[in-house]
Image: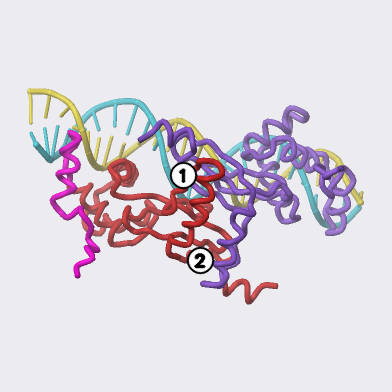
Chain colours: A purple, B red, C yellow, D cyan
Amino acid sequence: MDTTSRTVDGPESLKNTLHQRGLRMTPQRQLVLDAVRDLGHATPEQICAQVQRAAPAVNITTIYRTLDLLEKLGLVRHTHLGHGAPSYSEQEHQHVHLVCHECGTVIETPSDLMNDLAERLSGTSGFELDVTHVALSGRCADCARAGS
Amino acid sequence: MDTTSRTVDGPESLKNTLHQRGLRMTPQRQLVLDAVRDLGHATPEQICAQVQRAAPAVNITTIYRTLDLLEKLGLVRHTHLGHGAPSYSEQEHQHVHLVCHECGTVIETPSDLMNDLAERLSGTSGFELDVTHVALSGRCADCARAGS
DNA sequence: GTCGTTGCAAAACGTTTGCACACCG
DNA sequence: CGGTGTGCAAACGTTTTGCAACGAC
């Protein structure tokens, strides 16, 4: 009954993944990865704040560099939810983001909803949709009820 | 047989729309609206360059303020095509953007493709998808062929 | 003449870069 | 000890803000 919410990359495996590519394990890298997992999805600045609770000296530059690295390693992913800073989440945390452009709420929805669309797109234009890296905008149920 | 590529808002109607709300017609506002229409879709900086060909003194601050205003008036719309500056286009210019995250190409695709998805979303979560304000990311046909 | 609108300069925001020092392996 | 990784400061691109002057009505 264990759905492995903690994925393949346990505490040791980040080290391994890094070493396989001649990269080095550092406390900062573990902290950033932990922060991304703990926060679900968060901006670099939010991740920085979270990391600094454990290690106040960590600079935001390191957050940016580490997020880029973890993304290249396939451990995290980022999505642009409209304006402002992008949102990082762990790679396995698959979902489509629905952003309400009235109140800004972000709703997560299973990505299977996009499968039909993905097929149709690859059929018509050969475009391979990345179902996991998508932000759709519109109006959430609450705002739809309140508005017009 | 006139499909009114020039929409409801001809040269006079911007003035009317503004006056209806107690706002003022200025050359800058007309120039920005014209630029958006001429460019199809463009960033504020590109729009600024276009406007400055006619009126070099116009400041980019005015571009930003005017784009916000025209958006509130429902005459233009902006889309975030991933990183960097947003892209503005006229409201009627409806399509879905497919952004290749390898080469950055932006493909436009008819928005009808999203109708099924829109229905399913409103069914499951009451979310009203804005079919026109969407950027999907993935890999374009060329990069898919070249890559793996 | 009023008051909305503009231009300019400066600040704010998010991100990147250069460089010397630190520390992983 | 070699070279990767880090912190700091400064630069960068984009957007916003404060304010005095301008100009639409």
Q: In which quadrant is the C terminus of chain B drawn?
A: bottom right
Q: Is residue B31 magenta?
A: no
- Which mark, residue A72? none
Q: Are marks 1 and 2 on the same chain?
A: yes
SS at circle 1: strand
Which of the two discs, 1 and 2, labels the residue nearer the N terminus? 2
**A71 relative to B119 in the view: left or right:** right
Which residue sits at x=74%, y=49%? A92
SS at circle 2: loop
Give the distance between the C-alpha atoms of the residues marked 1 and 2, in whole angstroms.
28 Å
User: Looking at numbered disc 1 in the image, what kind of residue is underneath it?
Assistant: Glu
Chain bearing tag 1 is B
Proximity of marks 1 and 2: CB atoms separated by less than 8 Å: no
Q: Is residue B12 magenta?
A: yes
| Residue B64: x %, y % from top left | 34, 44
**Residue B18 in which image quadrant:** top left
| Residue B63: x %, y % from top left | 31, 46
The answer to whether residue A140 is seen in the rendering is yes
Which residue sits at x=51%, y=66%? B105
**A56 relative to B18 in the view: left or right:** right
Which residue sits at x=28%, y=57%? B35
| Residue at image mark 1 | B128
User: Looking at numbered disc 2 in the image, what kind of residue is underneath it?
Assistant: Thr
- The region drawn magenta spans B1-26
- Which mark, residue B105? 2
**Most extreme residue toward the front, as rendered?**
B123
> Which is nearer the eye, B123 or D19?
B123
| Residue A142: x %, y % from top left | 48, 33
Characterize the local packing of mark 2: few (<14), some (14-19) or many (20 or more) Cα atoms within 10 angstroms.
some
Chain bearing tag 2 is B
